[in-house]
Amino acid sequence: MRNLNFLMMAFLVLTIFGCKKADYAAEENADSTAIAVTTTDLAEEENYIPDPNTESYAGLEENPFESPLKEPLSTFSIDVDNASYTNIRRFINEGQKVPKDAVRVEEMINFFKYKYPQPDGQHPFAINTEYSDCPWNKNSRLLKIGLQGKDVPMANLPATNLVFLVDVSGSMDEPNKLPLLKESMKILVKELRSTDRVSIVVYAGSAGVVLEPTSGENKEDIMDAFDDLHAGGSTAGGEGIELAYKLAQENFIKGGNNRVVIATDGDFNVGASTDDDMLKLIEEKRESGVFLTVLGFGMGNYKDSKMEILADKGNGNYAYIDNVQEANRFLGKEFKGSMFAIAKDVKIQIEFNPKHVQAYRLIGYENRKLKAEDFKNDKIDAGELGSGHSVTALYEIIPAGVESDYVPSDLKYTKTQKIDGNYSDELATVKFRYKKPDGDTSIEIINTIADRKINLENSSPDFKFTTAVSWFGLKLRESKYIANSSSSDIKKLAKSGLQNDEDGYRSEFVRLVEAVN
């Protein structure tokens, strides 16, 4: 009874005056470096009730159809992130409705592997295109553009300087946050070589170094340091980022892979806490030549909007770890692609031929669009491509002469002129620009795409599956641009693209489609 009264009094005090901040102290011993954290009494009770759902997602407005006569160029940065897909998977597996703004179609598409050919020339990626029917609008077609990054053997990859920046604030004190984070980091540590160096910075009420630069050969020391982390307190995200980049720069490996890995639920609530503050901070830090990986954990207070900003503006990539299997995929099987960039600031620009294209629409990449003049501006940041990674983009195209409610209305002086000439068989010209990981000057590649459509049933398994994933994403977003949103049709198309499914992720996707009415 006395214990019960004590707990009730504690609850009242905390309710009226707010939770007190935790105290933090770094403690060192002979075996490893630890951080000791004192949490509030309430957080340690079995009946602790977490805060209500405060997840946040940046609003997205779908790309509209554009006329090639008014807007001849479509320009965007690549995006290798796939956090949106694993987050969507989490919602569906828990029987919850997926928030519209949690759906980024390009990240759903780029979660999956595709059988694109490896590059065999001087460039670090190969280009793949395919043109076929659009299943959700009978009068439209789809153009798929794929990039396949060169798969560099691990032995040929440069030495790595990794700084882990780990959130140990009170919001991380849940099974699917810090405990899952620890298991995930151990998976990554197993991939390290003796030439690699690892440091660990933690942030909560304050930031501190808990593991000085350590050789990847000393895996037990690194794992012990992760094991000794505990959660509690508010989140000084900005201070932690400052310290992590400082440590990365102090141990910078010239010609190496220098990277900060942030692991958090994104709930920065003190310090540089607004999205604009974080944006300015991370844009400043990317100039150091240090790359960034952002790993998201947990639910309820998950701040996708902040994580995406960090990755997009920090020469980085972003993944949401919803379970150990996902950690094994992103940090184990795809370690090279996740942690080693083979090209940075990769941009794509497409010019559509109005002889064949009445209107076009880029599916997804809403927050990756660039101005036409940004394409050749080497000061404009864009996405990175990792070793062995692929990137895919889809355009919905309304062919010339086809009636459609989605075609933008013509202006007085922009009537389509169908002129036969040297370019009459070209659907579009696509240009790519990229920099080497340690370079400052872009290299440009130009390809033309012929106006040769194949029927959907004769398209590749990758085209069918990519289209099904895109279709499902548009359905989840309640897109105004799809006439047919039948789950059974999406499922049927996805099942016709299951040939390349060694890891079972495509079959899992079919089950997710089945679970959504």
Image: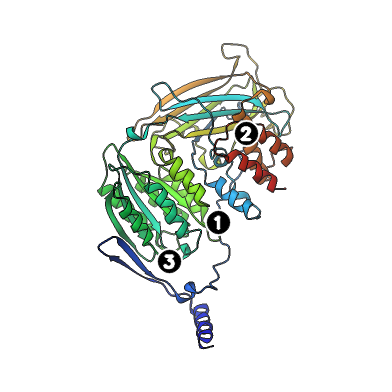
**As drawn, 124 above or below 271:** above
What type is the residue that disc 1 sits on? Ser
Residue 200 as seen in the image, left or right of residue 21: left
Residue 503's x, y, as percent?
Answer: 54, 39
Quarter of the image where one finds residue 229: bottom left
What type is the residue that disc 2 sits on? Leu
Residue 239 as seen in the image, left or right of residue 92: left
Asked if the residue at tag 2 contacts the one at tag 1, i.e. Cβ–Cβ closer than 8 Å, the answer is: no
Q: Residue at x 47, y 44 (%)?
A: 330
Q: In the rendered image, which residue does mark 2 sit on? A: 498
Comparing 110 with 422, the one in front is 110
The furthest residue to the bottom: 2
Mark sitting earlier along the chain (1/3): 1
Q: In the rendered image, which residue does mark 3 sit on? A: 234
Total labels drawn: 3
Mark sitting earlier along the chain (3/2): 3
**Cα gap from disc 1 to disc 2, whole angstroms:** 33 Å
- Mark 1 is surrounded, within 10 Å at the Cα level, by few (under 14), some (14 to 19) or many (20 or more) other residues, namely some
Q: Residue at x 52, y 47 (%)?
A: 83
Question: Residue 239, can we see it?
Answer: no
**As drawn, 245 above or below 337:** below
- Mark 3 is surrounded, within 10 Å at the Cα level, by few (under 14), some (14 to 19) or many (20 or more) other residues, namely many
Q: In the rendered image, which residue does mark 1 sit on? A: 56
**At numbered mark 2, what does the secondary structure look like: helix, strand or loop?**
loop
